[in-house]
Structures are given as structure tokens and as C-alpha cells.
Amino acid sequence: MEILVSSANCEEAFSPSEGHWVMGGNLAMEPDVDPETIRFSEEAWNDEKMYFMEKIQEAIQAHEKRYKTNIVKISLTGKLGLWNGNPVAGNLFNPNENPLEKMGNVDEISVERAEDGTITILGHHHDGTHRMHVYLLSEKRLDAINPNWNSSYGGLDADDFEKIYASGSPLKMKSY
């Protein structure tokens, strides 16, 4: 398992020797920073999210070219880490929206890549860890899951996200 992105590594601190703020991860180990000034860096996190989204867009383009289809939705689907169990749940959104911003109310987010390239987005919080996969969905695939996915009744239901999760075809990235 390789960690590609982690909000925990998005820090900033003041460096007296350089006379300005620096960004990075694990700044407590850096001798040139004032440890009292170490804090979460929204700027560094936004940079990480933007880079991840660029990689998602590249994956969408490659998928569309390879399978001669258009991706109309992304599903972030997986197991929720709750105090009372690990149900499968999901979120359906447009391909121009960042999956990292769809993780809900969590304390920390990280992205892992397995040896086979499967991407897992982890949302850590006080009850546990959400383990979500990214699924690129064409209109044809959505119609197979639920023919009414695009109706005024709104999106997909819990059974539909179970089908997506059971399909075993989450996004894989061979390089990052």
C-alpha cells in the first residue's frame, strides 16, 4: 500500500532562519522551524486536492478513450467506519467534482494505492475510518444499475451503491 495523499502531511510553520513560513509534512522533525508555529496548511491541502483532481481527470480521459464512452458521474462508494458497523454507502456526483471533497465530516483524509493500482480514499474520524473507492460511471452503466438514476426522484439508493461496490471495478491508477 502506497500513500499518495494525506491531509496529515499538509503543515505549515514559521522558519526563523529563512524569515518566512514553510510548508511540508512532518515539520516537527525540521530543525529550522519553530515547533510552536506548526499548524494545518489549507494552502498545502488545496494543492494536494488540486493535483489529485488532475489525476482523476487524466483517468477519466483514459477510460473514455479506452472504452469509447463518456463518464457522466463518479461514485464514491465503500464501507463506512461507524461505531455500530460498516455499512456500504456512496455518493454520486459530477465528474468535475473532487472526490476528496465528498468525504463528509472527517478529521483526516488520505488516499492509498494498492499494488494492483486500486485507489482507496480513507476518511478518518472519531468513530472509525471510511474506506471508499472511486467508480467512473457511464450512462450505460448507470442505466444497468438503476434505469431511474437520472429521474426527478433523485440519484441512487442504498441497494444501488451495494451493486456498485459488489461490481469490483473501482478506479485503478498505475502511476501517480
Image (cartoon, rainbow, N blue to C red):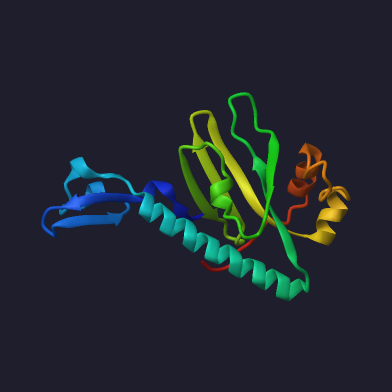
Residue at the outermost top position: 84
Q: Residue at left 80%, top 43%?
A: 160
Residue 26 is at least partly visible in this image: no
Q: Residue at left 44%, top 57%?
A: 48
Q: How many marks?
A: 0
**How far from the left and from the top, in percent, is residue 89?**
69, 39
Q: Is residue 171 left or right of residue 100?
A: right
Residue 50 is at least partly visible in this image: yes
Relative to residue 173, is residue 23 depicted above or below? above
**How far from the left and from the top, in percent, is residue 87?**
69, 33
Q: Nearer the viewer, residue 127 or 98?
A: 98
Q: Nearer the viewer, residue 30 or 23?
A: 23
Q: Residue at left 60%, top 29%?
A: 82
Q: Residue at left 78%, top 70%?
A: 69
Relative to residue 59, is residue 91 depicted above or below? above
Q: Is residue 42 left or right of residue 129?
A: left
Where residue 72 sits, quadrant-wise, is: bottom right
**How far from the left and from the top, in percent, is residue 84?**
63, 24
Relative to residue 56, is residue 16 depicted above or below? above
Residue at the outermost front position: 152
